[in-house]
Image (cartoon, helix red, strand yellow):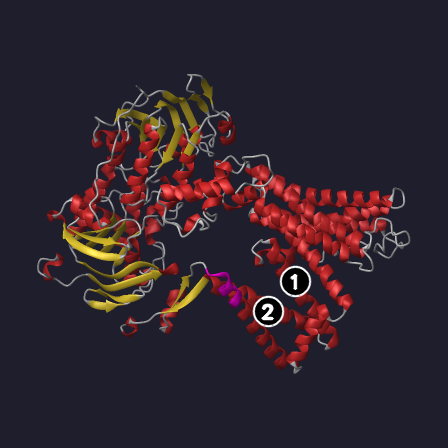
């Protein structure tokens, strides 16, 4: 068996055996996991959220210590106590959240914390950075400040930082989560170059098409356990999903036909500036219709947040108009109204924001307390009514199959999927006519994601105008009826999701083609 | 950084966050901490003074419970400290770090004294007391309103602002003390309206301190209910947890900040009223007695729960009274009793670490390096 396995009988660069890690509250993140990583191979570490992928790699990079098990590097048993130990062994990890100093240049960030020589020699460092970039095909200007960089450039800095520290075992945690398809492709090219150079590469992901695209081997984790290793060329999406989820899953998203669409909310010439004067949205116009899911695509930070927040009265609008259209055709402008005033106009507007625990919910409050957020003003008493929110919490838990120890559990203790269900459940409970969602399935595993899709489709069939800001183009194309593409705060196009291709959307995300001149 | 030091010692110790702990276990840890603190105090006492620790502890206890008078003084001190702590509850729950309790109490004192001195004997006594109360409460509220309004409108730093307001209040009091001084040249305001007792709070039976104690007791219950069950209490909790969430559900954050701080200052003002009209009948710049700061500790130790504050306030007052008693009966100076209070508080606050975290020793693969 060892023969047909990866590495072809060579000594693995990393060999993890019997790794176990338990967290507070008895959550077993990793249970007796064995994993081998070889040089010259790209491994995809595949698993749902909470399956223990990141924990496992954090132990390899010295952030956590395993409770039990051994790690051998190049055949020698080692103990990794800190990220510095890991780097000394040639292990470098690029985290999902970048750890860069914004006001410094790329080169300064890359050499930050290194103790080589007495004097800070930025020139020599820049030269070496340039060499690394040329060797692997990175596109990076060492003198550019981090705050001037796009997300993908920041990621490049992180990777080069690891290479500069001579890491030859490279771990990337969900590297494509923040990238456009084109940027992902570029990243994969670089990864292939590094692989050809004999480096060992691990990418943590739950996107199947990327696994197929770039990896040589797939190692699947499920609920903290190692499930198996597959050769990428000999497997397919269905098999991987089944290993990942534990049962067969239908992978296509249901999309009911649009019935009797009516204009529900109208945005015209919307322009928004951030508090420091940057143009965030420029002359955005569209109409969202009832009974339809309008997708909004775009690289993160293209104005999605500002668009949703101006529609909910949370963001100051510079110019333009947002009009709510009642069932009888009356129009009412909601510009300049606070969220409370909008609600008092009889506009049933629900909003599932991107920052679930920081904006949509209060992490330290229990389920009942969070259900109260929308309803606590009801009634004339000076005291809050806790009974009906409690009943609502019970209903939401039952209907959306939220797993929680009790209704008194603070929501921050729940898993990401359950947090999102609490939030969406509350927002749907107010029977909205417009439902705005931002990255509704970000960080959610396959099962939870499909629950969310189902709930959104239910709302659509109820005649709600659903706006779905998303990042995965496959999902946008399968779930939505129309897709509005934002690029740098402008609408670069509105497409019919049923007939458009991923490439078309991807191109609109990066260019202004058909934008303002239209 | 810690890891580096540890790896040199080859110790395999990790600090791990705990899941929620049942209340009886947490109470057990706290009791154990208190027990250990008492033992350490005993050792320290014996080593430093040679006195019998048991008799020192007995003296500490007698500081609060030694006689009926001491017991009432302890209750009065407890209720005043508790009153200021209650004022901190809404502000701190909102994450508004009001450390201006001292100044807010003092302006309450000042307003009460002003009413007693200027209106005493000129209007009916009941009305005078009512006027003093209103003046004290408004003054405290106003003193808290200034930093709150600036925070709400211009996001100024409330910690610095409220702290500075303390100094202003102290100087303002010093100014009026010179104006009101009696007898002239003494540099202090003697007992106000000593003969007529105009503006003094009435006494219930023979118990001089009973009325203020009762007032604070009722206030505790009101604040508890306000924080826990009222809509405003819910709003300020949401603002404290996340301003973004508050805005998202349409809560006006500036309004909640100002409203809660006015409440906080008003309760401090009430404390000032109780001090001047209820017990001291005079005014000095130190009348607040550091309660504005001690109250911060009381409120934190009780995690802003008004009922819990009764216990934490009691602990601090008890230690303080005991400390004074040791100083007199053993001829030790006050600093020694402060050492003992320090040890006990260190243990009690330190044990919170073991409630949130546990220490794990690595096992198994220890052999290979």
Outermost residue to the right: B195
Rendering coords of residue A424 (x, y %): 39, 38
- Horizontal side of B3 relative to A59 (left or right) equals right
Q: Quadrant of the C terminus of chain A?
A: top left
Residue drawn 46% across and 50% down?
Answer: A408
Asked if the residue at tag 1 contacts the one at tag 2, i.e. Cβ–Cβ closer than 8 Å, the answer is no
On screen, residue A346 above or below A184: above
The total number of labels drawn is 2
Rendering coords of residue B199 (x, y %): 84, 48
Q: First in sequence, mark 2 or 1: give its number.
A: 1
Helix, strand or loop at mark 1: helix
Rendering coords of residue B228 (x, y %): 57, 47
Name the subunit of mark 1: B
Q: Which residues are magenta?
A: B21-28
Helix, strand or loop at mark 2: helix
Distance between mark 2 and mark 1 Cα atoms: 14 Å
In the rendering, which numbered label is found on residue B344? 2
> Closest to the observer: B197 or B167?
B197
Rendering coords of residue B229 (x, y %): 58, 45
On screen, residue A240 above or below A29: above
Residue drawn 55% across and 73% down?
Answer: B36
Q: Which quarter of the figure has residue B313?
A: bottom right
How would you classify the magenta stretch by its main secondary structure? Answer: helix
Name the subunit of mark 2: B
> Closest to the observer: A126 or A246?
A246
The residue wearing badge 1 is B314
Residue A280 in sight in this render? yes
Residue B100 in sight in this render? no
Q: Which quarter of the figure has residue A68?
A: bottom left
């Amino acid at each position: 068996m060892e023969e047909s396995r990866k590495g072809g009988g060579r000594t693995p660069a990393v060999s993890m055996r019997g790794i176990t890690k338990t967290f507070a509250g008895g959550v077993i993140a990793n249970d007796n996991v064995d994993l081998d990583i070889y040089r010259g191979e790209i491994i995809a570490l595949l698993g749902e959220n909470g399956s223990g992928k990141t924990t496992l790699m954090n132990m390899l990079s010295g952030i956590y210590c395993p409770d039990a098990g051994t790690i051998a590097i190049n055949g020698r048993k080692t103990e990794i106590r800190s990220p510095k130990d890991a780097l000394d062994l040639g292990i470098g990890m690029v985290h999902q959240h970048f750890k860069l100093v914004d006001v410094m240049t790329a080169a300064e960030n890359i050499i930050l914390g290194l103790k080589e020589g007495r004097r800070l020699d930025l020139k020599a460092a820049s030269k070496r950075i340039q060499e690394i970039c040329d060797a692997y095909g990175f596109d990076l200007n060492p003198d550019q400040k981090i705050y001037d960089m796009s997300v993908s450039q920041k990621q490049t800095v992180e990777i080069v930082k690891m290479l500069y520290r001579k890491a030859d075992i490279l771990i990337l945690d969900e590297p494509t989560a923040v990238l456009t398809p084109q940027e992902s492709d570029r990243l994969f090219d670089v990864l292939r170059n590094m692989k050809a150079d004999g480096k060992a590469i691990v990418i943590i992901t739950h996107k199947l098409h990327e696994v197929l695209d770039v990896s040589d081997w797939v190692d699947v984790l499920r609920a903290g356990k190692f499930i198996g290793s597959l050769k990428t060329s000999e497997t397919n999406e269905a098999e991987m999903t089944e290993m990942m989820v534990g049962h067969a899953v239908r992978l296509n998203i249901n999309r009911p036909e649009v019935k009797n669409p009516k204009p529900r909310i109208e945005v015209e010439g919307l322009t928004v500036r951030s508090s420091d004067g940057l143009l965030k949205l420029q002359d955005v116009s569209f109409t969202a219709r009832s009974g339809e899911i309008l997708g909004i695509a775009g690289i993160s930070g293209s104005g999605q947040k500002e668009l949703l927040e101006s529609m909910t009265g949370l963001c100051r609008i510079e110019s333009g108009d947002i009009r709510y259209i009642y069932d009888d055709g009356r129009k009412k402008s909601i510009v300049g109204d606070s969220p409370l005033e909008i609600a008092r106009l009889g506009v049933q507007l629900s909003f599932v924001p991107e920052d679930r625990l920081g904006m949509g919910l209060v992490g330290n409050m229990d389920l009942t307390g969070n259900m109260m957020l929308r309803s606590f003003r009801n009634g004339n008493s000076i005291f809050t009514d806790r009974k009906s929110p409690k009943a609502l919490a019970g209903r939401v838990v039952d209907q959306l199959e939220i797993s929680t120890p009790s209704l008194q559990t603070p929501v921050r203790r729940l898993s990401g999927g359950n947090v999102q269900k609490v939030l969406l459940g509350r927002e749907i409970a107010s029977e909205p006519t417009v439902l705005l969602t931002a990255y509704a399935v970000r960080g959610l595993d396959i099962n939870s994601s499909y629950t969310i899709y189902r709930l959104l489709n239910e709302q659509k069939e109820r005649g709600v105008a659903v706006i779905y800001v998303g990042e995965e183009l496959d999902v946008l194309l399968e779930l939505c009826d129309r897709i509005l593409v934002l690029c740098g705060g402008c609408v670069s196009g509105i497409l019919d999701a049923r007939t458009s291709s991923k490439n078309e959307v991807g191109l609109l995300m990066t260019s202004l083609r058909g934008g303002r001149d239209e | 950084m810690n890891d580096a030091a540890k790896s040199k010692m080859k110790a395999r110790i990790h600090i791990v966050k705990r899941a929620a702990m049942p209340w009886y276990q947490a109470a057990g840890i706290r009791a154990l901490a208190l027990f250990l603190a008492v033992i350490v105090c005993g050792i320290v006492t014996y080593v430093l003074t040679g006195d019998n620790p048991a008799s020192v502890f007995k003296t500490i206890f007698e500081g609060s419970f030694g006689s009926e008078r001491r017991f009432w003084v302890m209750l009065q001190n407890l209720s005043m400290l508790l009153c200021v702590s209650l004022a901190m509850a809404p502000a701190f729950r909102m994450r508004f770090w009001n450390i201006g309790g001292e100044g807010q109490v003092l302006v309450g004192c000042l307003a009460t004294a002003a009413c007693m001195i200027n209106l005493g004997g000129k209007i009916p006594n009941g009305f005078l007391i009512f006027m003093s109360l209103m003046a004290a409460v408004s003054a405290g509220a106003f003193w808290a309103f200034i930093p709150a309004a600036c925070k709400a409108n211009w996001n100024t730093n409330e910690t610095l602002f409220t702290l500075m307001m303390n100094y202003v209040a102290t100087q303002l009091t010093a100014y009026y003390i010179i104006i009101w001084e009696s007898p002239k040249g003494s540099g202090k305001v003697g007992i106000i309206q000593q003969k007529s007792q105009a503006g003094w709070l009435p006494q219930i039976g023979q118990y001089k301190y009973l009325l203020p104690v009762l007032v604070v007791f009722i206030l505790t219950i009101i604040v508890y209910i306000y924080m826990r069950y009222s809509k405003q209490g819910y709003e300020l909790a949401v603002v404290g947890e996340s301003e973004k969430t508050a805005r998202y559900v349409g809560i006006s954050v500036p309004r909640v900040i100002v409203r809660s701080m006015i409440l906080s200052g008003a309760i401090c003002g009430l404390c000032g009223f109780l001090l001047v009209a209820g017990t001291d009948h005079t005014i000095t710049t130190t009348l607040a007695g550091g309660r504005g700061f001690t109250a911060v500790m009381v409120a934190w130790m009780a995690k802003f729960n008004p009922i819990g504050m009764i216990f934490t306030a009691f602990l601090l007052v008890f230690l303080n009274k005991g400390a004074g008693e040791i100083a007199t009966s053993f001829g030790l100076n006050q600093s020694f009793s402060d050492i003992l209070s320090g040890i006990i508080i260190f243990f009690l606050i330190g044990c919170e670490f073991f409630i949130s975290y546990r220490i794990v020793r690595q096992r198994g693969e220890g052999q290979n390096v």
